[in-house]
């Protein structure tokens, strides 16, 4: 098994696999300031809700380090500004806000301490978020493996692997677990337009680990589902509402509709940190709209005519009634979602 580390913090530098460059080039992006972290999250050097959360936490650590030599009043003012910048780097992934809130609590709790001690407390919290993510993913993988049958053919969308987390992965973590437990699985990976995370990242991870798989265009999935070629669909999540509505990479909703028509189990795999206990339904989720160039260009090459307008939402919302279950580190949540999600709180 090849270990893929998307994030590493050492010697006051956050090292990230630059996911914009895969699969043709394996490069490490160095974040030496919280501004570098903000850029990395915004520009998708790092992506995937859990990975974004961990990167954001280390961004706060880098901010604290930068302002250590200031007097107390300026230190707290500057940290507040850094927290605001990091929190606003991307709007949909709830893990980002969750991590920033955790770091804020550490600052408030330790406000009377020496600045160096506040820095150390923040570093300890970021390390906890990092380590918890790996532990969480492995627990989810074990629970998720329960729904995977021998010789299962699995369809997945976007990238939910080690690259989307600190390590191991969410939906792809379940796939890893099924593979390593000898279930003889086969995976179809959607290419995931417009940024092609399926072909650039998921396919790369599957090849790295020798998991039998085929890459497909997004529009092929419906035919495979209709023809009875898919046993189960596993996707990740960027935000889950109290009623179980789930925001995930654009194209997920479409898959869920087809899965429901043809009675194929459709599972969301996400840590409980991705549940937003403050929103009732998916209608309240802000959907990020990204640059037109993601649609009009591939790897910098224009594929659409000049002058065409573009609508490019990064995510869509899958209604809870299309979801068979939500696989978390605390077990598999089944309908009625609101009632069972509240039990987790």
Image: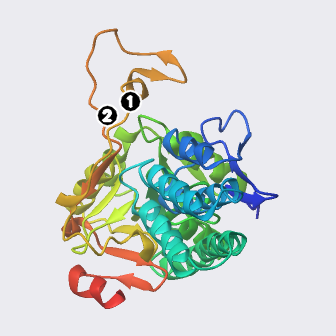
Q: Does 154 sit left or right of 185 as displayed?
A: left
Q: How far is disc 2 from disc 1 in space, using C-alphas?
A: 7 Å
Left or right: residue 340 versus residue 248 is: left
Q: Position of residue 196 (x, y in %)?
A: 49, 38
User: Which residue is painted at 31% across and 65% down in the image?
Assistant: 264
Question: Which mark's residue is nearer the viewer, 2 or 1?
Answer: 1
Q: Which mark is residue 291?
A: 1
Judging by the rendered image, the residue that carries numbered circle 2 is 312
Is there a contact, CB below 8 Å, between mark 2 and mark 1?
A: yes
Pick the front one: 31 or 122: 122
**Residue positioned 44% across, 73% down in the render:** 273
SS state under label 2: loop
- Provide the secondary structure element on which disc 1 rests: loop
Q: Give residue 102's position: percent from left, percent from top.
A: 50, 73
User: Crowdedness of circle 1 by 10 Å Cα count: few (<14), some, many (20+)?
Assistant: few
Q: How many labels does the image show?
A: 2
Q: Is residue 158 left or right of residue 33?
A: left
């Amino acid at each position: 098994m090849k270990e893929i580390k998307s994030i590493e913090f050492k010697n006051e530098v956050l090292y990230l696999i630059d996911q914009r460059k895969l699969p043709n080039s394996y490069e490490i992006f160095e974040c030496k300031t919280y501004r570098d972290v903000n850029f990395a999250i915004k520009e998708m050097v790092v992506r995937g809700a859990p990975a974004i959360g961990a990167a954001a936490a280390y961004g706060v650590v880098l901010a604290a380090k930068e302002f250590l030599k200031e007097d107390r009043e300026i230190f707290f003012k500057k940290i507040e500004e850094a927290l605001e910048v990091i929190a606003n780097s991307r709007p949909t992934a709830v893990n980002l806000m969750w991590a920033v809130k955790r770091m804020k609590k550490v600052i408030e709790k330790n406000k009377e301490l020496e600045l160096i001690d506040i820095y150390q407390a923040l570093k300890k919290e970021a390390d906890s978020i990092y380590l918890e993510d790996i532990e969480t993913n492995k627990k989810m993988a074990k629970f998720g493996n329960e729904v995977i049958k021998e010789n299962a053919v699995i369809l997945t969308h976007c990238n939910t692997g080690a690259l989307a987390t600190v390590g191991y992965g969410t939906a792809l973590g379940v796939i890893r677990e099924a593979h390593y437990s000898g279930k003889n699985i086969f995976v179809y990976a959607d290419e995931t337009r417009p940024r092609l995370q399926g072909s650039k990242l998921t396919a790369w991870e599957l090849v790295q680990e020798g998991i039998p798989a085929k890459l497909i265009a997004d529009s092929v999935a419906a035919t495979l589902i209709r023809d009875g070629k898919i046993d189960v669909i596993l996707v990740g999540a960027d935000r889950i509402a109290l009623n179980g509505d789930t925001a995930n990479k654009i194209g997920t909703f479409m898959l869920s509709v087809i899965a429901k028509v043809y009675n194929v189990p459709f599972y969301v795999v996400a840590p409980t940190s991705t549940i937003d206990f403050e929103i009732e339904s998916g209608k309240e989720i802000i959907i990020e709209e990204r640059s037109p160039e993601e649609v009009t260009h591939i790897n910098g090459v224009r594929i659409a005519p000049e002058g065409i307008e573009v609508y490019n939402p990064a995510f869509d919302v899958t209604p809870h009634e299309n979801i068979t279950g939500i696989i978390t580190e605390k077990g598999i949540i089944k309908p009625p979602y609101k009632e069972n999600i509240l039990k987790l709180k």
